[in-house]
Amino acid sequence: MAIMKKNAKKALEQDSPLCCCEYVDRHGGRSHVAACCCDCEDLDEACDRWMKREPQKQDSLSRVVATVADRLRVPWISGAKQVDLSLIPPLILLPVLLHIAALHYLLGIVVLIALPGIVLWYYYLTHRKKGRTLFFLSLALFSLFYMYYLFVSEVVPRGDVSNLQLGVVTIGVVLTLITLMYTKRGPGYVRPHPSETHSTVTYHSPPPDIDSTYHNGSRHQVVIASRVSSPEQSAESEADPGGALQKDGRRKNWCSFCRVVKPPRAGHCRICGACILRLDHHCVWINSCVGQANHRSFLLMLLLFLSTSLYGISLVLRSVCPTQSALTALLYCPDVYSQYSSALCFTCAWYSSIVTGGLLHLLVLQLINVSYNVTEREARIALRDKMGHSLFWGLIIDTGVYSHGFRGNWTEFLTMGETLEPPALKPADLV
């Protein structure tokens, strides 16, 4: 009897609400932020093997990293929240590298060449593994905030920027963040047809690797769909007694991961783990897919960011090199490294120009694809299957499948609905 009471008390303790500093670790146990350095068996074992000069186990490093990532948390109202390790490197590397680049023009050349190389290397590394990371979103947001901070703290005190110009830059930054938040609402997910829904499982705590954007509160629903045909599909099967056309079409559009029939132009994203309506591409800079529901806001965000960035770069270069035009000052600005503050502003202008150039290329591709009514995914498939017309060295891919002319394509793009299903039925593996 005493044992039963003890077990019941333990179960009650486990089910009691978490305080702001408590959390459930990766082993399912209840832990506290203050105990982050306690019971580090994996780290102790790795250090012990290193001290004894014994070879490490194959998975020892991954276990240490998993333990550190699990215990790196910040207090929150409903329990301590885990901090993704990929958020941290941009917060450290970007300021350090930019300040190093401002010491000498040779260091500036090395840093401004190495920094994009590091980002591209990490992109291809994560893209090959189809892994999800917050590194690029962290780098994008921190770059925006840090450039604005340096603009206010280093450029504005020089007296070359008026209050109106500062206000324009500030409004541009705020509008960019607002459109980013709107874009992050979701790309539009393919939901199972009610007639194909087999059952729904509700979890009262979110599964791992699930972004809070895609579930309401603490409950998270997973829809299990079967391949049972709907009444409309039954009517089609009667018109096609052999069922060859229907079977072939359903086999082609059936997603074995989400267990849904994908509508035309929808695609499955292996990074998000969900089927997206009118999937264009997965953008690492916003850590989300670009689809039917957020494609317009994604283009608006690019336009706002590029306009603000170009205007801010021109103001910085006019302040640093007042006797030259902005384009000339970016290529040649004598004596800019004689003062550290001017060198730092000049280096940040170059960094912003590199980022702006990359996003400008992305915007041009997006505008061309919209003009031809082709998504980035459809363009890649057309090139792979050799079913599209490639123009200007692959800059333009015309599949001719959905095109209605320039005006018709843009009208369809600007007026297409989000067609989002009710929030009760949500895919299981959205991030």
Image (cartoon, rainbow, N blue to C red):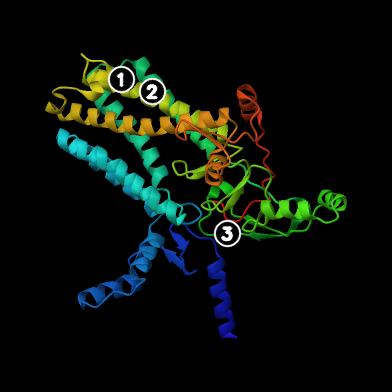
Residue 68 or residue 246, whichever sits in front: 246
Q: Which mark is residue 205?
A: 3
* Secondary structure found at label 1: helix
Quadrant into which the N terminus falls: bottom right
- Alpha-carbon span between mark 2 and mark 1: 10 Å
Discs 2, 1 touching: Cβ within 8 Å: yes
Q: Residue furthest bottom?
A: 1
Q: Which residue is mark 1?
A: 315
Q: Is residue 45 above or below residue 315?
A: below
Dot placed on the residue nearer the N-terminal end, 1 or 3:
3
Figure quadrant of residue 107: top left
Residue 43 or residue 53, whichever sits in front: 53
Asked if residue 133 lies left or right of residue 375, the reply is left
Residue 75 in sight in this render: no
Figure quadrant of residue 353: top left
Asked if residue 399 lies left or right of residue 239, the reply is left
Could you say where residue 267 lies in the image, as x and y percent from the top left?
A: 60, 47
Name the residue at 38% across, 34% down.
358
Q: Which residue is mark 2?
A: 169
Amino acid carrying label 3: it is Ser
Residue 130 or residue 390, whichever sits in front: 390
Name the residue at 81% across, 52% down.
230
Could you say where residue 47 lies in the image, as x and y percent from the top left?
A: 26, 72
* Secondary structure found at label 3: loop
Amino acid carrying label 1: it is Leu
Residue 350 in sight in this render: yes
Name the residue at 67% across, 33% down.
417
Q: Which mark is residue 263?
A: none
* Secondary structure found at label 2: helix
Q: Residues within 10 Å of mark 2 (few under 14, many from 20)?
A: many
